[in-house]
Amino acid sequence: MHFLPENLDKYVVDHSEQEPKLLQQLTRETYQKVLQPIMLSGPYQGRVLSMISKLIRPKSVLELGTFTGYATLCLAEGLQENGKLHTIDINEELVDFQRKYFDASEYGKQIIQHTGSALDIIPQLNETFDLIFIDADKPNYSNYFHLIIDKLNKGGVILSDNVLWHGKVVEPLDEKDKSTKAVLDYNTLLKNDKRIETVLLPIRDGLTISRKI
């Protein structure tokens, strides 16, 4: 989803950091072999995620929705030397694809994969996190928030992707459209929850930054 005119968007991308070669390779193979490659974060948003992670310097990161591991590697760039990144995805068919690229990076030993429902896995994680990235099934966004908020350290950050949902958040709501309604409810939840402060950025399909007070 592009909210800027194409020429201005190109200028923004051209004057931002370029993606690493490993991520370029990951992107090519994703488009060659995996269904719905558009789910990739992409080079510009990937650099945004990398920059935020580098500014936070997290010791512990949790990612909900691994897909082929593009955003995972971007977030890992900011990890402290002994930091860990836990990433959860329900698609077991992508585990080997992810691991190949994780191990090809310098962060392979710091990335821990979990396969299954995040709703089941999150309660089993006996640690807290400095940075959490939510980019999974939209109908469960609010459920994920309620599960992770107490696992987020004070001053920690939640990044939530696709919060503008292709612009549907400002269109008349079709009551049968569960994903759009879920995103609307989630955005309201983030706005009103007094435990966090939130800014919604119109980056690509919308990225919210929420900081725990």
Image: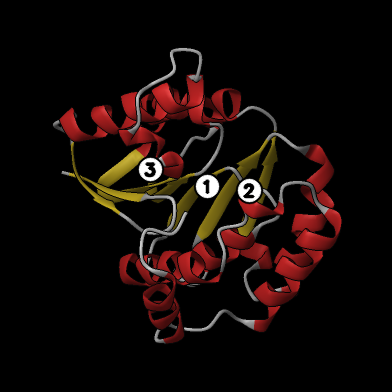
Disc 1 is placed on an element classified as strand
In the image, residue 195 above or below residue 161: above
Gap between marks 1 and 2 measured at Cα: 7 Å
In the picture, residue 117 is in which quadrant? top right
Say which residue label 1 marks. 63
Q: Residue 206's spot in the image, x, y percent?
A: 38, 50
Q: Residues within 10 Å of mark 3 (few under 14, many from 20)?
A: many
In the picture, residue 185 is in which quadrant? top left
- Residue closer to the observer: 158 or 113: 158
Gap between marks 1 and 3 measured at Cα: 19 Å
Please name the amino acid that badge 1 sits on: Glu
Seen in the image, is 169 located left or right of residue 100? Answer: left
Q: Residue 28's spot in the image, x, y percent?
A: 77, 69
Please name the amino acid that badge 2 sits on: Thr
Mark sitting earlier along the chain (1/3): 1
Disc 2 is placed on an element classified as loop
Please name the amino acid that badge 3 sits on: Leu
Disc 3 is placed on an element classified as loop
In this rendering, does residue 103 appear at all?
Answer: no
Gap between marks 2 and 3 measured at Cα: 20 Å
Q: Residues within 10 Å of mark 1 (few under 14, many from 20)?
A: many
Question: CB atoms at circles 1 and 2 under 8 Å apart?
Answer: yes
Say which residue label 2 marks. 66
Tell me the residue at 50%/30% (across/down): 138
Report the number of numbered marks: 3
In this rendering, does residue 84 appear at all?
Answer: yes
Q: Which mark is residue 37?
A: none
Tell me the residue at 62%/69% (across/down): 107
Say which residue label 3 marks. 164
Seen in the image, is 197 located left or right of residue 108? Answer: left
Residue located farthest toward the top when viewing the structure as drawn: 175
